[in-house]
Image (cartoon, rainbow, N blue to C red):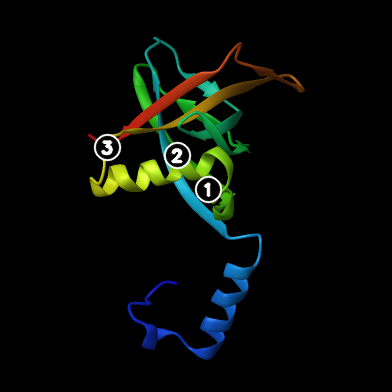
């Protein structure tokens, strides 16, 4: 869909591919979320894996794992890029459809409601040949609207 601004920009093959996507049960989407990790401690902090769950108004959209060693400097921060893949079709079913419409309406100012996007994170460190998970979840929230 890049560089498509009007109907005349679509070739026959583009239109056929779009029709196939719209009539299937899968509409693949991918976004990159940049998470800023802060270390308030006097020593460098390390992480080897990050399990995450993405929620929209407390409804699970998708989850995944970042398998990447990250070092966070003492009293510093670093940005962790997270590639999030999901089926757009899932946003139009069940409780997700109401949450998704709330986000659209919040972004366009069509209602007075807000929506909440949250990431639940569980970092792990490698100790020898074992991964040790952080005891609990770290939740990062962002409110959309108002």
CA gap between label 3 and label 2 equals 13 Å
CA gap between label 3 and label 1 equals 18 Å
**Residue for badge 3:** 145
Q: Secondary structure at mark 1?
A: helix
**Residue for badge 1:** 91
- Quarter of the image where the C terminus is located: top left
CA gap between label 2 and label 1 equals 8 Å
Q: Secondary structure at mark 2?
A: helix
Instruction: Give residue 101's position: percent from left, percent from top.
Output: 41, 46
Instruction: Depth check: give the residue in front, 63 or 89.
Output: 89
First of labels 2, 1 by sequence position: 1
* Residue visible at 61% across and 11% down in the picture: 135
First of labels 3, 1 by sequence position: 1
* Residue visible at 40% across and 10% down in the picture: 41
Q: Residues within 10 Å of mark 2 (few under 14, many from 20)?
A: many
First of labels 3, 2 by sequence position: 2
Instruction: Give residue 14's position: percent from left, percent from top.
Output: 52, 82
- Side of 60 where 104 appears, left or right: left
Splitting the image into 4 quarters, where does residue 131 fall?
Answer: top right
Instruction: Give residue 94's position: percent from left, percent from top.
Output: 58, 42
**Residue for badge 2:** 99
Q: Secondary structure at mark 3?
A: loop
């Amino acid at each position: 869909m890049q560089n498509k601004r009007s109907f005349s920009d679509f070739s026959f093959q583009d239109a056929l591919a779009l029709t196939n996507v719209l009539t299937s049960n899968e509409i693949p989407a991918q976004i990159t979320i940049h998470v800023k990790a802060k270390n308030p401690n006097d020593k460098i902090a390390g992480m080897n894996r990050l399990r995450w769950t993405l929620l929209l108004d407390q409804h699970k959209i998708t989850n995944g794992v970042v398998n990447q060693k990250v070092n966070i400097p003492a009293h510093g921060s670093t940005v962790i890029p997270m590639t999030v893949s999901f089926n757009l079709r899932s946003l139009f079913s069940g409780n997700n459809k109401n949450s998704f419409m709330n986000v659209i309406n919040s972004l366009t100012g069509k209602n007075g409601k807000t929506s909440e996007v949250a990431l639940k994170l569980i970092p792990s460190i490698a100790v020898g040949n074992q991964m040790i998970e952080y005891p609990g979840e770290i939740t990062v929230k962002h409110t959309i609207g108002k």
